[in-house]
Amino acid sequence: MDQDDIVTKITNKLSTYLNKPIHVNLTKSIISQFEKNNSFDPFAQFVKVLGISQDHANELFHDLDSELHGIIAKPKPKMRRASLEDELDLELAKPAAPKFKRMKKQDALRIKQETPTPSPAASPASPASPASPSANPRDSVKKTIHASNKEEYAPITPSSEESLDELETNIETEREWYTIDEEGTYARDDEFSENFTSSRQYKRTKVASTGYDPLTGEYIDTDHTADHDFSRIPIINHVFIPPFLQASQEYLQLQITGGSIRGIGPTVNPIKDSTSELAIMARTGSMTVQTRRTQKERALQAKERTGVSHESTTDANPDKQEKKPEDDTNRETILEQRRNLPAFAVKHDLITTIRDNQVTIIIGETGSGKTTQLTQYLYEEGFTNLNGVKQVIACTQPRRVAAMSVAKRVSEEMNCKLGQEVGFTIRFEDKTDPNKTIIKYMTEGILLREILVDPMLTNYSCIIIDEAHERSLNTDILLGLFRNLLMKRRDLKLIVTSATMNADKFTRFFGTAPQFTIPGRTYPVEVFFNKNTCSDYVEAAVKQILTVHLRNSSMSSGEYVNDGDILVFMTGQEDIEITCDLLREKLDLLENPPPLDIYPIYSTMPSDLQRKIFTKKNLRRRKVVVATNIAETSLTVDGIKYVIDCGLVKVKLYNPKLSMDTLQVVPISLANADQRSGRAGRVGPGITYRLYTERAIDSMYIQPIPEIQRTNLCNSMLLLKSLHIEDINRFPFLDSPPKDLLNCSLYDLWAIGALDNLGALTQLGKSMTKFPIEPTLAKLILLASRPEFHCSEEMITIVAMLSVPNIFSRPKERAKEADMARDKFVIAESDHLTLLNVYTQWNINMGKRINISAWCNKNFLQLKSLLRVKDIRKQLLLIMNSSKLPLLKSRSDDDIRKCLAASFYHQAAKLTKMNLSGNPEFVSLRHNYMKMYLHPTSSLLDSNLSTNFVIYHELVLTTKEYMNYITVVDPMWLLQFGYKFYTVADSYKDKINLPITKKNGRNDCTNTRFHNLKIIQGFRMTDCNIFNFKFWIGLDDWFNDIHDFLGWNRGFLVVVESFT
């Protein structure tokens, strides 16, 4: 075979791999690269940046070696398939960067016209023009997980040198995460994402088949035309307001334009005065944190440029210590501790008040014993036996960690095994016995789901809503439900516990409910303010810690003694960790400083590390605890005398631009400031240092804004609709949510098919409530169980993986190794399929006789997270079985991707250009003003996007809007399932076989179907631009189930407006 034949053959093969015609110059560049090195590793690196997978690179290398062996007399290297058990090679040779000639757009188009394109007839592998998604040429080359996973990724048995027992395991401790709320949604923090923004660079580069305008950075595809590929369909967004929300259009500006009647977001602004010093501090953040972050990124980049290994000889988690067995707690000691709690002194009066009233408001500071003792007092007084029938005492908690830890403590105090008389229930975990449990701690979301099953709560005699002052969304919903429920069940007791703030509001809400105060052990606290505005709250906090520590430490008998511990309030994990690091550095600069133990505490820390703050190594050593607002009420740290308050807090807010909740730093309220100061006066007179001026008090809200007035209400609205509350506006909210948030949440439920055009719950919406996850993920499972998609077995795994935080471990000092290990799991064009592949490989290795912990450490995976995924998957299977949903195995990866498109069509984006650095830039299909980018951890960074369109699970807001968990989808799927939002230009309707045809300037639609809806014979539509049309449709059961948004009632006149 001569050189030209080889070039033609390789060009056709590349065209099949990349799903587009390939210019011969690109083929010649690849052949030249092969001739230059004739070794696989640099060759694979070279073609990988073009979007060619490892398997295709292997096949291409063998073809070139076979065809050119007569020209290049070099030995053929021995190849074998890469495996997950292969050792990581950190010494990969760096191939020379390919050089491409820049040209003007006009020259590129001229060359394209002059260069013949391989015709379909010339090569069987050339793609045919598809008429539908099923005819897409990508189908012939797409890898499938369910059929080939085992073959493609089956690990090769390691040699003795590769023994798993000898692998390094110094990866940071896997952590249990607690930020997810009970409905499965959680606000994304920007700290995690910023760790990746520079350390894992985009890998897409300029290739010969594309061009760039050096002035604008516009992406020009010189090999692609719309005539032969429907992946570039110009989808147009339109706005349709369902009839039940027509009267509320003014409150839907968040969905229509991304603004609101106030112009910048939710009606309730979390910042009272945007020009105040605290508001400016919240916006600008800490310069120390920003500088440290930049320094770490630059140091990491320098190491990568110089080829310095990222391996560390030290433990990645220096705080990790060998777990010591706990000493058996003396029974008498426990009883003595109970008797010393403030609640014990008023036990008799407390029980009398509860017995005489149906609703009781209990006021008590953190540490008074109301959470652990009240349930036991009620049990001792016989509230678990109602007329000879066993009843349960329930106590709700706003956080999972609190429900688990309190249940464990109460079981110890009652001298019983956890899960028997005392147990807990949280999302996807039930540690109770139906026949034995009489005291049950649970999260608020669990109680809401129990109300769905048993609206009268017949198994309970007492319900305690603990920490109600935090005003979580679920707390407010529960209180509204109980106000109606208590009128139907006069024997049910409701107890609402609160700190001093908000107590009067609860009393007024329940009419004549009495307040009972548990006397606290509080002492006077002296408060100091900054004289001047603080420019950097992290640096100021460190200085204040050192000042307090050094001034108030003295020598006694040759040893330092201190007068009390220090509690510092910061906004989040990054602030806390940098504060601790900076404090250690400052102490190292001092000569023989007084000893100081430094403990960080935030919600995502594992419980064993959290417990360290409650212990003290030596009474003579001072302890400083740097915490988030979790230490305001949820945790009680004894021995605190000094409090340092930065005046800021991170809260969950609905972001209209992202259409989701995010975490944002805002000033605290005056009630929060007083609560923080009170932490210093529990063991004696205390001192609080506020890192803001006294005039900043005027810019604070009196009370914190309730969650119901600042977050997305979709889950709560779906639950209320399931409880047959048709008119949400008449529900007795403790504080009514803003009209824009309420109506936008109803709009979102309508958009995903949970509500019909009249605002009633659809069959799909009813089924969603059976799953304790966010509605879109529940819809994903329900659709996957239908024969059309046929992939529920894989989808429950994907949903379980999405229900836990990141399963990949990425230690800072071994980031390059972690990225290389992650790449071995990547499935091109889909992060969802990558997650599925991770779980599949982990599950396969779980069945082998290997050390699974070492396997996870080697592949930088979080073992605890994967075990959690397995438990969640089991729970989802049980729910599917109880709902009689079939478990169907997918026939191809496209079944899964199509199902994802059918669920997340409202979260779709289109590729618009590639900037000069090769980074793809997307724009939201629904809000074309919003630019979005691939998350730095996305699998799509290493693939050649064969279509312009993607769907995403969530957006992460840092310096940019990053799409997270992304999958490439066919635009025809978006048109098929997202007809509420998308259509195409008139010129494309004939090409994609839309039922509406244009004749004589009119859109005629007779004897046809519109979006698969049967149109009554003889009806004619007019006005080809905006489709203001009316038509009669025949409805059947199938239609009512699938197309709820138009299915009002049989024979009703449907009016569809604003379809463009």
Image (cartoon, rainbow, N blue to C red):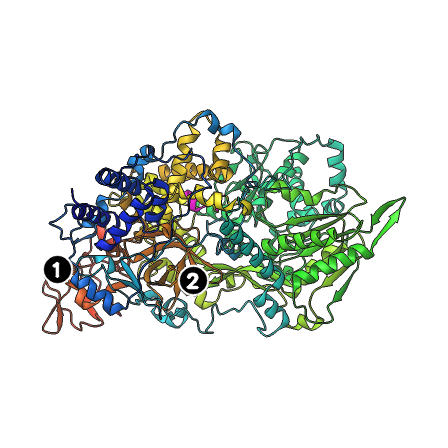
Mark 2 belongs to which amino acid? Answer: Leu
| SS of the residue under disc 2 | loop
* Left-right relation of 176 to 30: right
Mark 1 belongs to which amino acid? Answer: Thr
Front of the two marks 2 and 1 = 2
Q: Position of residue 37 (x, y in %)?
A: 34, 43
Residue 708 lies in the magenta-colored region: no
User: Looking at the rendering, which quadrant does residue 526 occupy?
Assistant: bottom right
User: Looking at the rendering, which quadrant does residue 116 occupy?
Assistant: bottom left
* Left-right relation of 729 to 462: left
User: Looking at the rendering, which quadrant does residue 800 occupy?
Assistant: top left
* Left-right relation of 971 to 669: left
Residue drawn at x 15%, y 53% is 118
Residue drawn at x 57%, y 32% is 420
447 up-or-down from 932: above or below = above
Q: Observer-nearest residue: 428 or 859? A: 859
Mark sitting on residue 658: 2
424 up-or-down from 113: above or below = above
Q: Which residues are magenta?
A: 800-805
Q: CA distance from mark 2 to mark 1?
A: 38 Å
Look at mark 1 in the image and give the residue it sits on: 1008
Single out the residue that lies furthest toward the right. 557
Mark sitting on residue 555: none
